[in-house]
Image (cartoon, rainbow, N blue to C red):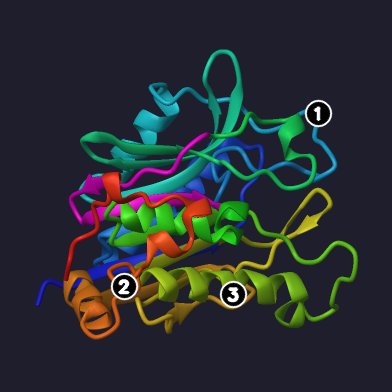
């Protein structure tokens, strides 16, 4: 068996970039000691998320994809594949982005496409979803609200993604909060999206999230690893922690898709408004 040990993190991060790196270094060492090969850190773990979804004039520190901070993250990753969220300085615009790194450098970068509430006041919108190859398999990345749209994960699955990694700064309900975060309706949606995206595309799913509070936001944590059948293999609950699970990814995908292959059995001609995507279909026909 070729099992991959994976971990998704729930942890707090803020504007103190050096403090964030110290926290990440400690998490990476814990993950390395546990034999983890793929580690998912939360959205905006380099510099913190927005303090308020109605707009944040200060915002997190802008970082260049080819800058020293991302190089520092790559050095920490070493032989591990690490996904982390940051504020990307692209020169003309800032983007809410996720980067995938390895000791050899950057493997992939994703700019958040779907923007909730007033996030567009702080960031430009990404324009696409694309899977990419890594030492642990073919990955696709999403950020937070991206996972509320089935087309996001489906696009990645059709591009051959075996593992979906969604990094988030997903808060509890703002309009009708629950005193018990475990019963919060936004936490329930967060969990439903994680399981549905894994099951409908029959892929492995890692979901990382911020924990604790930042500004006006209280995050639901709930980092998890989900198998291609939509079953949660490991979950942090609403507190800080690291969800760790081992899986032979290829074997798990093959088993899930053997009888009912959700990607294989699509009928694109029945829903032409969505587009066929057949010209770019890269999914392995298990």
Q: Residues within 10 Å of mark 3 (few under 14, many from 20)?
A: some
First reached walking from the N terminus: tag 1 or tag 2: 1
The range drawn in magenta is 127-143
Q: What is the spatial separation of the Cα atoms under label 1 and label 3, in whole angstroms?
A: 30 Å
What residue occupies the far left of the structure in this picture?
A: 1
Residue under pointer 3: 191
Q: Nearer the viewer, residue 271 or 25?
A: 271
First reached walking from the N terminus: tag 2 or tag 3: 3
Residue under pointer 1: 57
First reached walking from the N terminus: tag 1 or tag 3: 1
Q: Position of residue 112 (x, y in %)?
A: 56, 41
Q: Is residue 3 magenta?
A: no
Q: Residue at x 41, y 52 (%)?
A: 155
Q: Nearer the viewer, mark 2 or mark 3?
A: 2
User: Tag 2, which secondary structure?
Assistant: loop
User: Tag 3, which secondary structure?
Assistant: helix
Q: Are marks 2 and 3 in contact (CB under 8 Å)?
A: no
Q: Residues within 10 Å of mark 1 (few under 14, many from 20)?
A: few
Q: Position of residue 248 (x, y in %)?
A: 19, 74
Q: Are marks 1 and 2 in contact (CB under 8 Å)?
A: no
User: Tag 1, which secondary structure?
Assistant: loop
Q: Quadrant of the C terminus?
A: bottom left
**Could one spot residue 204 in this view of the protein?**
yes
Q: Nearer the viewer, mark 1 or mark 2?
A: 2
Relative placement, left or right, of 97 versus 129 is: right
Residue under pointer 2: 265
């Amino acid at each position: 068996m070729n099992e991959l040990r994976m971990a998704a993190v729930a942890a707090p991060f803020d504007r103190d970039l050096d403090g964030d790196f110290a926290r990440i270094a400690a998490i990476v060492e814990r993950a390395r000691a546990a034999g983890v090969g793929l580690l998912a850190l939360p959205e905006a773990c380099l510099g913190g998320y927005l303090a308020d979804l109605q707009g944040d004039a200060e915002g997190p520190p802008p970082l260049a994809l080819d800058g020293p901070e991302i190089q520092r993250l790559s050095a920490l990753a070493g032989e591990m594949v690490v996904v982390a969220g940051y504020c990307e300085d692209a020169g003309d615009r800032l983007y809410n982005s996720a980067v995938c790194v390895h000791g050899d450098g950057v493997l992939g970068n994703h700019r958040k496409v779907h923007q909730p509430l007033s996030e567009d006041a702080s960031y430009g919108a990404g324009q696409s979803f694309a899977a990419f190859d890594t030492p642990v398999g073919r990955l696709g990345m999403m950020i937070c609200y991206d996972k509320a749209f089935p087309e996001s994960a489906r696009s990645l699955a059709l591009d051959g993604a075996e593992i979906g990694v969604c990094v988030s700064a997903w808060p509890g309900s703002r309009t009708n909060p629950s005193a018990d975060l475990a019963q919060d309706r936004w936490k329930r949606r967060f969990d439903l999206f994680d399981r549905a995206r894994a099951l409908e595309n029959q892929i492995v799913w890692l979901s990382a999230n911020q924990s604790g509070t930042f500004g006006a936001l209280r995050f639901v944590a709930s980092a998890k690893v989900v198998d291609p059948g939509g079953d949660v293999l490991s979950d942090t609950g609403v507190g800080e922690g690291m969800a760790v699970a081992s899986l032979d990814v290829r074997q798990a995908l093959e088993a899930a898709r053997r009888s009912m292959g959700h990607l294989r059995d699509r009928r694109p001609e029945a829903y032409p408004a969505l587009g066929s995507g057949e010209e770019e279909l890269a999914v392995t026909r298990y």
